[in-house]
Image: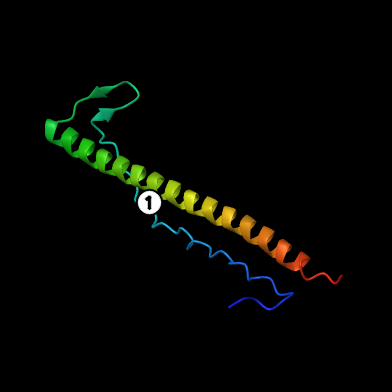
Amino acid sequence: SMAQEGQAAACAAPVAPPAYRPAEMPAGPATPNCLNLEKNISTCSDRVLNDWNAKTKAQNDLKRTRVTEMNAYTRELQKYQNAATDYAQCEQERVSKLLPN
């Protein structure tokens, strides 16, 4: 049905994305005492090194996942910001049509 004369169509208000609240990042693995990262010297067994490398890789994978999530959330916020701008423009146009002659 047509809007009543003098009443412009309603503008669609944007809905904000849910806030991004990630879980606390777990601490990375402790560097084994047999490993001197500054001097790049190791007296570790292969088992200790492999275990530390696996835990470090898992931590880095988690960080990459977190960055991906944050980037996706930022894109959602940008879409929301654009929709809010469109809404404000629509409302300004709607209200300007209500001005008395």
Horizontally, is 68 left or right of 97 in the view? Answer: left
* Location of residue 101 (image quadrant): bottom right
* Location of residue 41 (image quadrant): top left
Q: Residue, x 26% and y 34% (percent of image)? A: 33
Q: Which residue is mark 1?
A: 25
Binning the other alpha carbons within 10 Å of mark 1 as few (below 14), some (14 to 19) or many (20 upward) gives few
Kindly state the secondary structure of the residue where label 1 is placed. loop
Horizontally, is 4 left or right of 70 in the view? Answer: right
* Location of residue 86 (image quadrant): bottom right
Disc 1 marks a residue whose amino acid type is Met
- Is residue 39 visible to us here? yes
Horizontally, is 83 left or right of 49 in the view? Answer: right
Q: Position of residue 6 (x, y in %)?
A: 74, 74
Q: Position of residue 24 (x, y in %)?
A: 39, 55
Q: Is residue 41 above or below residue 65?
A: above
Q: Residue, x 38% and y 45% (percent of image)? A: 68
Q: Residue, x 68% and y 78% (percent of image)? A: 4
Q: Position of residue 94 (x, y in %)?
A: 71, 66
Q: How many marks?
A: 1
